[in-house]
Amino acid sequence: MNETYVDHPLTGVARIHLNRPEARNALNQAVREQLAEHFSVLGVDPEVRCILLTGGDQVFAAGADIRDMAERGAIDMLLRQTQRLWAAIAECPKPVIAAVNGFALGGGCELAMHADLIVAGRSARFGQPEIRVGIMPGAGGTQRLTRAVGKFQAMRMLLTGLPVSADEALRMGLASEVVEDDQVQARALELATQIAGMPPLAVMQIKEVLLAGQDASLDTALMLERKAFQLLFDSADQKEGMRAFLEKRQPVYSGN
């Protein structure tokens, strides 16, 4: 059985499923490798305009596979080069929506934070409990979490290992929306479909500039924004979008 799989429910949207229900979708090496492959392939597929990442109804992903890590040494962990696998997700040029039901803990929370939007079910729980097994986050949990919620909330989660509810995650800035549990997939797919209908070049430029600008000075970030804004005026989709607006019709975007 594949531990992850991909389907295309609608034109322009690809959905990646975590599929280890017997292990609560724990992220072992095989899962990480499959995720990296999926994101690398979908990231350059011209038919894909948005990626939806989802787990199960009860668990999004319950963290790293502790059984796979308990007796390993530092050199073992270094040689895994897992940062290369996570980079395939972080560097994906297409927008990514995480649909989170149930627990998103440890590596599962880090995986959700690699997305661009997070739609959470009311009973979802987010946490970085690594400290409770003698380690710390190793796939962005200290850095992405701090950038999302700020130092004081991040420290509380990281130093206690305690999870937060979906509503608290929304207030903190760790989720985009919270909906009822049975509406998570539908709402995430609705957002993905809306984004897939937008001009792809503009979508990718917005994502690239927003992420690059986070760690740049304001002047540098504004320069990146300005250059990308100007560049889009050479796209066919800019002409189509503005003509459609003036002609009071729906635009048809080609990605050119």
Image (cartoon, rainbow, N blue to C red):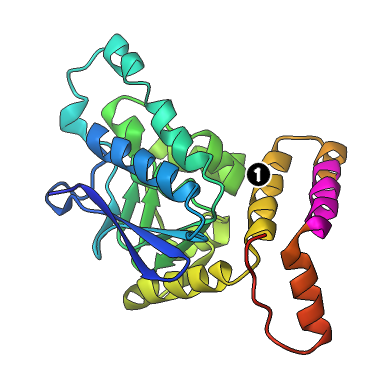
Residue of label 1: 211
Asked if the stretch drawn in magenta spans residue 225, the answer is: yes
How far across and how far down the image is residue 145, in percent? 52, 42
Q: Quadrant of residue 69?
A: top left
Range shown magenta: 223-234
Residue situated in front as seen by the camera: 43 or 107:
43
- Quadrant, the C terminus: bottom right
Residue situated in front as seen by the camera: 25 or 39:
39
Residue situated in front as seen by the camera: 23 or 33:
33
Residue situated in front as seen by the camera: 175 or 14:
14
Q: Can the viewer see residue 232?
A: yes
How far across and how far down the image is residue 17, in percent? 29, 56
Q: Quadrant of residue 82?
A: top left
Q: Can the viewer see residue 106?
A: no
Q: Is residue 198 above or below residue 225?
A: below
Disc 1 residue type? Leu
Instruction: Determine the main secondary structure of the stretch shown in magenta.
Output: helix
How far across and how far down the image is residue 41, in percent? 41, 45
Q: Residue drawn 38% across and 39% down?
A: 36
